[in-house]
Image (cartoon, rainbow, N blue to C red):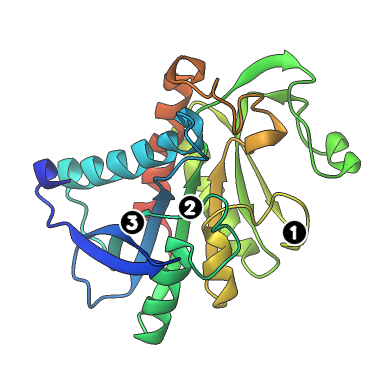
Amino acid sequence: MNSFGYEVHEQKFTAVEEEYVNLIVFYGNPNAPRIVVGAHYDSFGDQHGADDNASGIAGVLEMARLLQVHQPILEYCIELVAYANEERPFFTTKDMGSFVHAKRNFDKKVSTKLMVCLEMIGYFNDQEGSQKYPVSFLNYLYPTKANFIALVGNMNNHSTVKEFKKYMKQVAAIDVYSINAPSSIKGLANSDHRNYWHFKQNALMVTDTSYFRNPHYHQKSDLPDTLNYKKMAEVLKGTYYSIVNITL
């Protein structure tokens, strides 16, 4: 981040008597309303975590780079965050880095217009039957090939997800599908966006759908050579375009 011209801020916190840190940079005036773009930098156990979640962190870095290259004039501040402690044993607890971040912004009355969570964005498969879903009827509504990117929202942000999807589809050479559904459905709240939903904030997840397609999830085989970097680049092209064009 320093090489892109950003000042890196450390948000330190304690969990289970250990110190952890979220890393934060800002594009624009931090006093303006914000769009938060974040991904967790920890991996499960001692695994490599190429898709989960080095791919998401690569996405945050690419957002930072593109913002500095293109220098868009925005109504919002873009807050880019690398979170600690998304994985177990911290997942679903108040020791998640994203919970700490969401709560501190909420307590400070920061105007968070949108949070975009980049969670596993690098695994794709063109084989029939490679895509699974948490409930069977979704097989009739969505593709059975794992060659698309998904946008996940809750029951309160249909219009945001629709607009984000519209902009992604305008520039990204990849199929984009979206779902707005109750967070209780398996997998829909399985990343850092869940904590912004907890504070009643507008948040969505950009994802390759994790263990619903990637057989290397939480395995030592989650390695860089399992990722499709061309498709990742299209995902990030679309994500950037959506972030700088969306109206909130």
- The residue under the point 47% across, 40% down is 43
**Few, some or many C-alpha atoms within 10 Å of disc 2 (few <14, some 14-19, many ≥20)?**
many
- The residue under the point 37% across, 41% down is 57
- The residue under the point 42% across, 62% down is 97
> For residue 20, which quarter of the picture?
bottom left
Residue furthest right as drawn: 137
Closest to the observer, 206 or 16? 16
Q: Amino acid at mark 1?
A: Ala
User: What whole-number distance in Å separates the C-alpha atoms at marks 1 and 3?
Assistant: 25 Å
Q: Nearer the viewer, mark 1 or mark 3?
A: 3
**Few, some or many C-alpha atoms within 10 Å of disc 3 (few <14, some 14-19, many ≥20)?**
many
Q: Which labelled disc corresponds to residue 117?
A: 2
Question: Relative to 125, is 110 above or below?
Answer: below
Closest to the observer, 6 or 11? 11
Q: Amino acid at mark 2?
A: Cys
Mark 2 falls on what kind of element?
strand
Mark closer to the chain start, 2 or 3: 3
Residue identified by numbered label 1: 181
Mark 1 falls on what kind of element?
loop
> For residue 7, which quarter of the picture?
bottom left
Mark closer to the chain start, 1 or 3: 3
Q: Position of residue 74 (x, y in %)?
A: 26, 62
Residue identified by numbered label 3: 81
Q: How many marks?
A: 3
Specify whether 3 is left or right of 78.
left
Is residue 76 among the parts visible in the rendering? no
- The residue under the point 78% across, 26% down is 144
User: What whole-number distance in Å separates the C-alpha atoms at marks 2 and 3?
Assistant: 10 Å
Q: Position of residue 233 (x, y in %)?
A: 40, 28
Mark 3 falls on what kind of element?
strand
Specify whether 205 is left or right of 100.
right
